[in-house]
Amino acid sequence: MRWLLLLFLLTACRAQGLPEPYAALERGGKEALRQVALRAEGYAGLLAGWLLVGEEDLPLAERAEYAWRYALFLEEVRAFEPGWEAEAAWRVAAPLLERAGDGRAFSAWARLLPKEEAVLALLRLGEGEGLWEALFRGRAYEPLLKALPEGTRPDLRAQALYRLGRYGEALPHYRAWAEEDPRGFLGLGYALWRLGRREEALQAFTRYDHPESRLAQGRLLEEMGRVEEALFRYLASTPEGLWRATALLERLGRKGEALGVYLRLARGESPYADDAALRAYLLAGELGHGEARQEAYARLEGGLGLLVGKTPSPPALAPPASLPPEASLVEALARAGKAAWARGEVRYALWRRPKNWPALVPLLYRLGAYREGIRAAWPSALAYPRAYRAWVEAYAGREGLDPDLLFALLHVESRFDPLARSPTGALGLAQFLRGTWADVARMLGEPPADPFDPEASIRYAARYLRWLLERCAPFSGVERLACAVTAYNGGIGYTLRGIAREGDLYAFLRFQERDEPREYLAKVLSAYAAYKAIP
């Protein structure tokens, strides 16, 4: 945005001293901090209060209020940055609020469940329905079972036992719940299924007339080899059930019936809609159904359209925005080396004025907070920054890749967060597992670099993607790209074995055993199309 460039030029000429109230924060001192906490607007006031929570000579209620406000801020802004985790702040706020006799202590402690100290605090502070619901939401299942009076809330007791793996003990409580609410039969069915009592499970499911129950019936009947009965249930269930039905129909050679179900799915708005439209397009072509093929093509949205030569619609432009009031303060803080404070100011502004995101997201990008900016700007064109542009373009060029493909890959993998960690252990911008990272280092003929170094991560991703494209050489054009992108997520062995097993790429994309690579391909292709559409 032009105003952002102008701001940077103007502030370059300004003195490098910190503006108030941040100058007071820098100077420190209890009284100075207290004045900022009591009077200053924005992030500075929150931060000053947080710095005072350990001052025992200040009124307890005042310190508890500071801690509550700061913890709530961290929780709601959900910053992707070390040191900005809300849990640590709630650990401070909860005991302060309890000592102050503040009614919000229960809520603060509940955020720390299922930790033992939080359980003990809730048992001290709460009772009845509020206590039981909080323990259940906080996954404190054992304490919940002890707190529940016998014969009370069989729904909570049954679900707690189920989640603890105590399926047999859960059965009488599911039955008691089902006497009050037919939803209990759904849980009863799953518990019986877990116990291997499939016929009884099926009977329980049939007593709850709901699409989710019919999905469960279909899965159970399919497991039992009763395919026609499974199809009947699937076709009256959820989008997942319809997707499962199409697989059965195709495996049975009933492609015409499958085509109709694919079109039904494509007309909806479930996560299966784009996959169903693609499969309907391919099946209609194979069966010679022109009208169905035209409808499937028209309904094929998102990145999967690239596989059949259809370019997705570009993302909508962000609304026009003027210079936000925080801009000069944010830039001054950044130039003074206080980038964390600068990000705090922008986060506070976005928290208080979420509709002002078109003006605030460029400031987040300027400060390297791409992940948060993308979340705020989604799904507009502003949600597709070309982060680390010089490195992406240089290493893509070195490996003969389209830079927009590399941008799309990094966008999906980490939202350009160089410190990203996945639950499975994938690290950095390009989300490499350590084994694959070491493999790429060997390809490059060097010791493994730091996976949290953004330049190294981009360099390794470009080399690995080039290697995958080489392994996918039997394909050409966008099909080769689809093979490589799927392999980036699922592994090259998984991908090539699956293609060989199913006989072709598109059959593999439909019948592969994992959902994640299928969804991953659609996301990367959608991002790729978006980057191609944005100048």
Image (cartoon, rainbow, N blue to C red):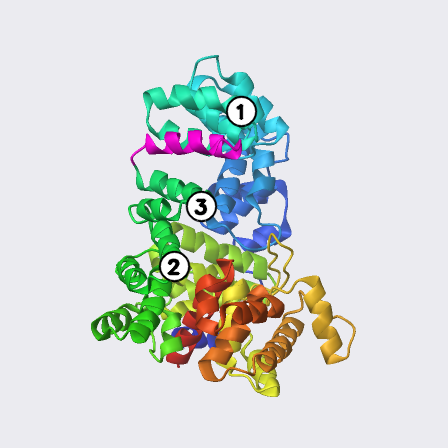
The residue carrying pointer 1 sits among few (fewer than 14), some (14 to 19) or many (20 or more) residues within 10 Å by Cα, namely: some
The residue carrying pointer 2 sits among few (fewer than 14), some (14 to 19) or many (20 or more) residues within 10 Å by Cα, namely: few
The image's mark for residue 252 is: 2
Spatial CA span between label 3 and label 2: 13 Å
Q: Position of residue 527 (x, y in %)?
A: 43, 71
Spatial CA span between label 3 and label 1: 25 Å
The image's mark for residue 225 is: 3
Q: Which amino acid does label 1 sit on?
A: Gly
**Mark 2, mark 1: which one is toward the viewer?**
2
Residue at x 47%, y 78% (from the top left corner): 479
Magenta-tinted stretch: 191-209
Q: Which amino acid does label 2 sit on?
A: Leu
Q: Which amino acid does label 3 sit on?
A: Gly
Relative to 72, say whether 138 is above or below: above
Magenta stretch: includes residue 208: yes
Q: Position of residue 371 (x, y in %)?
A: 50, 61
Q: Please, what secondary structure does the residue beneath circle 3 have?
A: loop
The residue carrying pointer 3 sits among few (fewer than 14), some (14 to 19) or many (20 or more) residues within 10 Å by Cα, namely: few
Residue at x 33%, y 78% (from the top left corner): 310
The image's mark for residue 168 is: 1
**Mark 3, mark 1: which one is toward the viewer?**
3
